[in-house]
Amino acid sequence: MNTLSFRTKQMPEPKLIFDRSSAGRVGCNLPKADTPEVDLAAVLGEVREELNLPEVGELELLRHFTNLSHINFGIETGFYPLGSCTMKYNPKINEKTAGLPGFANLHPMQPVETIPGALDVLIGVQDMLCAITGFDEITLQPLAGAHGEMTCLMLIKAYYEARGEGQKRHIVLVPDSAHGTNPASAARCGYDVRPIPTNAEGNTDLEALEKALDDSVAALMLTNPSTLGLFEPNIEKICAMVHAAGGQVFCDGANMNAMVGTTRPGDHGFDCMHLNLHKTFSTPHGGGGPGCGAIGLMKHLEPYLPVPVIRRSEMKVIADYDRPKTIGRVSAFYGQFLMEVRAYTYLRAYGKEKMADISRYAVLNANYVRARLKDVLPPAHDRPCMHECILTAEKYKKENGVRALDISKRLIDYGFHPPTNYFPLIVPECFMIEPTETETKETLDEFCDALIQICHEAVENPDLLHDAPSTQIVGRLDETAAVKNLDVRWWPKS
Amino acid sequence: MSNIPTDLKYAKSHEWVSLDGDVATIGITDFAQSELGDVVYVELPEVGRTLQAGETFGSVESVKTVSDVYAPIAGEVIEVNGSLGAQSELVNSDPYGKGFMLKIRVSDASALGGLLDAEGYQAVVG
């Protein structure tokens, strides 16, 4: 095997901006005030003295932040296979269109009659998302994924309340492999949450589901493909079972990247779903954000949509507030507008014909990684995966005292962002690797070579992993202390 | 290898029980603390609460996850381990001793027979 090269020396810790401070130094010279001086203490009462703001010149300031940016890691510096997060490349053309003055200079309080172009973008995104998901309606109002989940449950709740079943249907079923936001959203909407187990093959346990279904169930929240990276083969049957019990089925759309252009949740039998435009449709996230949700729903939930509803009326697109059954607004403004512009650009750049390339290459890349790593990190379930693969490092924990976390920290020394660890919770010493469709085979090979080498290190020299990372400005952080003694303020030393 | 003392009883959900008269001391096993990782917060019930066997009595939060903990046997809570508030790490360092979670007055000591012995629990954790 090739010996992979990586940095072996620890980076020096950068100075704080306060350490560069020198009294009286400024970044810009202001003219002397030609107005009478004011005694601030007299006007404001108390003047705080303890702020101790740094005083630096423009060049020191520039160097400080440029150096900080060099220790940052992002999709534009390296491979970032953080499972469940879909860290795909966000094409730069998205930024170009979002920066067009006609979009960028809109004011959120501008009268709606003055923004027909913006409404065209919104309805364009809605139309394309309807076509991709198979739902009757889309609203772009929710501001992030979990917000979309909650909005879907609010619609379901309104639907049952309108039918006089609001009290009776108080249970939401959530599989044990679900994202933590699912039970949280359900609890936030006042539902009682009941878990549904996953069977040995990694699918929903149909017997347990059958037992749990009765007329107290409002909804099943199902992630498809599941967080195990597996497509639920019984999806149509599951939806039919829930419908037969009078319930609704919500699709957690976190893993939509596995299905774009290939198959549609609306056709599987789901009643509603959320989408993360910041994952699947290439609006930025991972420290940059903001999150950008959208939800799709079938006709029977449409009367309860949050206002305004962006829809066509005669020859125009309007923002419709005349919706007597609406659940109201779920956000002060309609969605994250410039993110919708980015998603619109991305969708139009791919076009209908090429859309399926997204999911096909995402699934191919994940299966390639899975196949290359299977001898050192076996998959939790031995069958083809979707857009991410779930591997287990259990044997290194048992035989060498090396945990998934140690392997992940060692990957940092090799220049890669670690994959997601310890999720889903039902897989021991779990890695969740999502390469996305935008990575080349060469990059995937470099990553797999590094992981294979690290697994050899785990056997031969486990302390290399226990001590990792050894090349960054800080070593292994004390996560327990960070949780227990949370203090994010900086105070001057003196 | 997990430490599984032979003088305790175990639940499949990874709690241990030690019975002294009609008072049962309950905590989570060495295997459980090792799987959870560093424990940062332990939520425990009020003294006086009556627990059914299998009922959630609290939760354990680690840097990795939050897990419910279940009463392996029914009874009334007569003491909770107050030192876990400031020193949750005791669950990791001494799961069968200073890291215990609570003591309950059991309603039916014979129910202990339905729990696993060390050998049975060893088979569960593999």
Image: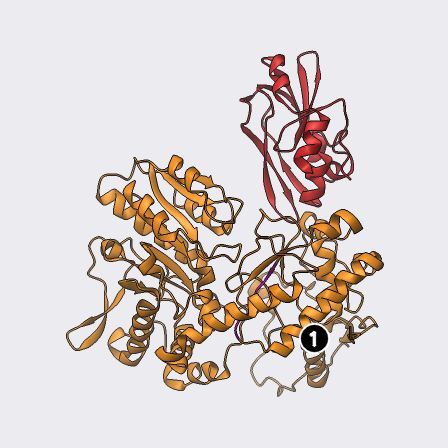
Q: Position of residue A222 (x, y in %)?
A: 42, 51
Give the chain letter at badge 1: A
- Chain identifier, orange in the render: A
Residue bearing mark 1: A68
Q: Is residue A258 magenta?
A: no
Q: What amino acid is found at the position of numbered circle 1 in the picture?
A: Leu
Up/down of B79 relative to A235, above or below: above
Single out the residue that lies furthest toward the left.
A314
Residue in the image at 64% along x and 78% along y: A442
Q: What's drawn in magenta, residue-wise? A: A432-437
- Determine whether, in the image, residue A298 is placed left or right of residue B108: left
In this picture the colour scheme is by chain
Quarter location, residue B2: top right
Q: Position of residue A354 (x, y in %)?
A: 40, 79
> Drawn colour of chain B?
red
Q: Nearer the viewer, residue A333 or A450?
A: A450
Name the residue nearer the viewer: A460 or A411: A460
Q: Quadrant of residue B69?
A: top right
In front here: A106 or A336?
A336
The correct choice, above or below, for A22 with respect to A398 in the image is below
Q: Main structural element of the magenta stretch: helix, strand or loop?
A: loop
